[in-house]
Amino acid sequence: MKCLYNGKIIISGKLYHKKAILFDEKIRNIINEEEINNIDGIEKIDVKGKYISPGFIDMHIHGFDGFDTMDATEEAMQAISKGIARNGVTSFLPTTMSMPIENINRALDNIRKIKEKGVQGAEILGVHVEGPFINKKFKGAQKKEYIIPFDYDIINDHKDIISLITIAPELEGALDFIKKVKNETNIVLSIGHSDATFEETLEGITCGISHITHLFNAMTGLHHRNPGVVGAAFTSNVSCELIADEIHVHPGLFSMLLKVKGLDGIVLVTDCMSAGGKEDGEYELGGQKVFVKNKRAKLEDNTLAGSVLNLNNAVYNVYKHTDYSIPQLIQLVTLNPAKVLGLDSIKGSLDIGKDADITVFDEEINIAMTIGKGKILYEI
Ligand SMILES: [Zn+2]
């Protein structure tokens, strides 16, 4: 059994001082600090006044430290898993892209294998399949020729490992696909890379879509006579991803977004590509060259190509631009993604009995220690 003490424990948006958290692979107890001296055989870790938070969950991340999910190798998945633990991430959804179907299948098979075998860093919860069932008009950094019509069979072979699929609900066959996925799997459906109107979006939501992929980016925007995907996201109770790197969405909107959707409605994601954790230079994403300069990742034609954002910095960026406290905002990378994925009974907060996924950080959310299921994955 281990114990973290001399920190500020974040529980349900509030801070608890002079408490200690006891855990093995699960959280076992939260007790008064002075009581830890009465317990024999525990490893005591002094966090020196830092925050003790639930571990972060990134439900949209393509790569890190020079590796990509589409590499479909064990080396890549281990490197991403270990790399993002430095950012306080304890679990994640490796995210695939529109590529030839055999590449997507290979990536999915690889993730299944590594998930069973176990990773050295952040835990793999499942896969976010982003494309190929998206709209070419809003392809973003996905390659046009790999975008294809809906095909349930591709999903059927991997429904055990897929957690979430990003789709465009306005495309032919979408509604049948949505209904089939909802009837036959536990997969969460999300709208993204979409040209849907307000009405088409709402129809998709009625059929079973419950989430929006990187709100504002690669979708119809908010116009007062044509409110698009963004307008439908604002007027329904779907959860919304936000890439809070201060590049994909103007930070002046962070506060408004949290007011409209509430603290329960936003999930911060990185959408990070392989250059995350690395220096500026030339990288690759979905078979296309990406140029990274000053924290911006762009294709040759200037299209934003994912991000190089770290999830801890995403939280800090929202903190800087809004009036919410760090304990309040932690929900956006812990409980909210856990709820979207239906995993909030085991992850997302420091409740007794949940997995001991814990992140320790300072006032600027610089990560000091990352713990996954009781094991120290990273420490400074
Ligand atoms: Zn993405």
Image (spheres, grey):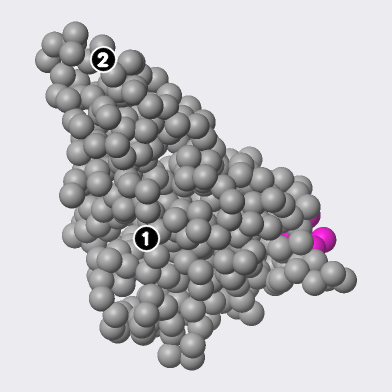
Above or below 41: residue 175: below
- Residue 326 drawn in magenta: no
Q: Is residue 347 visible?
A: no
Query: Which numbered marker is on residue 103?
Result: none
Query: Which numbered marker is on residue 34?
Result: 2
Q: Which residue is mark 1?
A: 310
x, y (%) of residue 94?
38, 56
x, y (%) of residue 87?
31, 53
Q: Residue at x 57, y 47 (%)?
A: 324
Instruction: Name which residue type carries label 1.
Output: Asn
Q: Compare residues 272 and 181 and report the one nearer the observer.
A: 272
Q: Is residue 290 left or right of residue 230?
A: left
Q: Is residue 252 visible?
A: yes
Above or below 214: residue 109: above
Q: How crowded is the residue under tag 2: few (<14 C-alpha within 10 Å), some, or many (20+)?
A: few
N-terminal of the two: label 1 or label 2?
A: 2
- Start-end of magenta stretch: 197-204
Instruction: Name which residue type carries label 2.
Output: Glu
Above or below 223: residue 12: above
Q: Compare residues 172 and 281 and report the one nearer the observer.
A: 281
Helix, strand or loop at mark 2? helix
- Residue 203 drawn in magenta: yes
Q: Residue at x 35, y 39 (%)?
A: 51
